[in-house]
Amino acid sequence: MRAIVFLLFVVLIFFIIRFILNRVIQIREHNKKLAEDKKGSLAENTTEAMVRCALCDIHLPQSEAYYDGKDTFCSEGHMHKFHHQKNTTTTED
């Protein structure tokens, strides 16, 4: 008799744990979906100016660009390369 009660108790605990885990998974999926929807709505509402790199002519959002006071660049390396090329051509003249 004790064995049957113990097995019923174990089965009851199993179903409780299974229910809790399923509920946690549902809540996480719901929160993930809400976050994706929020990102999508923010992306639709937010527009940002695009700028062009002075060296490679690639377009990128202004917030990601490097600005030296006159020109915009896609990376710090391109900014240094552009100024290096500009300085070497100026000194050759």
Image (cartoon, rainbow, N blue to C red):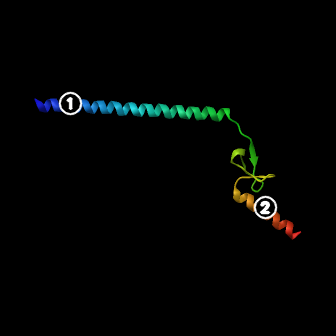
Q: Mark 2 points at which residue?
A: 83
Task: Left or right? Give the position of 58 relative to 26.
Answer: right
The N terminus - image quarter: top left
Q: Residue furthest front?
A: 69
Q: What is the x, y in percent for residue 36?
A: 55, 35
Q: Mark 1 points at which residue?
A: 9
Q: What is the x, y in percent for residue 9?
A: 20, 30
Looking at the image, residue 60 lies above or below residue 38: below
Please name the residue shown 74% across and 58% down the image: 79
Q: Tag 2: residue type?
A: His
User: What distance separates the C-alpha of mark 2 from that of mark 1?
Assistant: 76 Å
Q: Which residue lies furthest to the right in this view?
A: 93
Looking at the image, residue 8 lies above or below residue 54: above
| Label 2 vs 1, first from the N-terminus | 1
Looking at the image, residue 67 lies above or below residue 86: above
Please name the residue shown 67% across and 32% down the image: 45
Q: Tag 1: residue type?
A: Phe
Please name the residue shown 53% across and 31% down the image: 34
Mark 2 closeness class: few <14, some 14–19, many ≥20 residues within 10 Å: few
Mark 1 closeness class: few <14, some 14–19, many ≥20 residues within 10 Å: few
So how many labels did they put on this image?
2
Task: Left or right? Give the position of 85 relative to 10.
Answer: right
Q: Which residue lies furthest to the left in this view?
A: 1
The C terminus - image quarter: bottom right
Q: What is the x, y in percent for residue 35?
A: 54, 34
Task: Left or right? Give the position of 6 relative to 49.
Answer: left
Q: Identify the disc placed on residue 85.
A: none
Q: Is mark 1 on a helix, strand or loop?
A: helix
Residue 25 quadrant: top left
Q: What is the x, y in percent for residue 74?
A: 71, 53
